[in-house]
Image (spheres, rainbow, N blue to C red):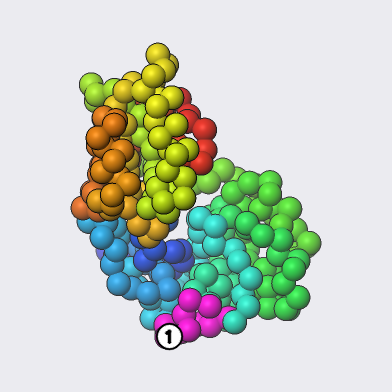
Amino acid sequence: MQKNKPLKKIAHFGAFNHDSFGDLIFPHIVEFFLDEFEIFHVSPGKLPTKWIDQKQVISVDDAFKKTDWDGILVGGGDLIHSPKNFIWKENIYQKYGALSSLWCGASLFSAKLGIPCAWNSPGVPYDASLDKTTLTRSSLDCVDYISVRDNLSRENLKTMTNENIIVSPDSAILLSDVWPKRKSRDKYVTLSITNDDLLKKKDDIIKLFSTITNSKEFPDKIIILPLMAWRGFDESKELKELQKKFDITVFDRGSSLFECAMVIANSFGYGFFNSKIARS
């Protein structure tokens, strides 16, 4: 290889300013597996979240001002939503076009620059055919490699394009390669619960916790992680009541992505409140 040869620059689009564990691990994964490139993570805005080890981001607006990109990467997460009220700039109406800029805008941008565009298994949660605009079809025609995270996403997208759609598992599962498991002697169950869950489903949560602590299948200790921090989880009255009844440890917002990943990796069982507990 030629010494001191500049690395090719890849613009990696995603919801990386979103206060979410799931969205913020993708930059770590991409940098790990694409270490032969210089990766720039692009999100609707560039203000950091409270996660102390998130990767630095640039705004969509700043990314679209540059013309020296060598490639575009989109995903993952449930990014593929209708580009209604499509907006490319960071402004007071950003909420209407933020997600659209990350895939529709990014795909069209790649065509404008004449560079490759690939999708890294994002999700398509809604039927794309409900969007009657030609913008979606045009943007899909610009993508060189389309992969989505599951069959539902493929079904929701396939009526909008003749391009080959690959179903590939969510790349989030590769996090164990980035951060190998570090063994822990503690035995516990890990859950992700929000303030909204506590307010609307308090009785169901108490029932779930009682089932866990009274079962011989699971440990008594429960760890709650702020994985969906954008929905809120703090020292509420409901939380304090739960802590009086059960052995609960709550990770605060100062936790790192790495710490949360290790807690999940070593847990006896893990799940969101409205999902079944999965044995590790």
Q: Which residues lie in the magenta part?
A: 86-96
160 relative to 197 in the view: left or right: right
Q: Nearer the viewer, residue 152 or 168?
A: 152
Q: Position of residue 179 (x, y in %)?
A: 31, 39
Residue 64 visible from this viewpoint: no
251 relative to 145 in the view: left or right: left
Say if the magenta span includes residue 92: yes
Amino acid tagged 1? Ile
Name the image quarter holding the C terminus: top left
Say if the magenta span includes residue 58: no
Which residue lies at the image location 68% right of the left edge and 78% below the top edge? 135
Residue 144 visible from this viewpoint: yes
Q: Position of residue 277 (x, y in %)?
A: 47, 30
Which residue lies at the image location 74% right of the left edge and 68% below the top edge? 130
Q: Nearer the viewer, residue 146 or 251?
A: 251
Q: Position of residue 56 (x, y in %)?
A: 29, 65
Q: Position of residue 98 (x, y in %)?
A: 49, 74
Residue placed furthest toward the top: 216
Name the element at disc 1. loop
In the picture of the structure, the residue carrying the numbered disc 1 is: 92
Which residue lies at the image location 33% right of the left edge and 73% below the top edge? 46
Local packing at callout 1 (Cα closer than 10 Å; few below 14, some 14-19, many 20+) is few
Which residue lies at the image location 30% right of the left edge and 45% below the top edge? 239
Question: Vertical placement of 220 versus 164: above or below?
Answer: above
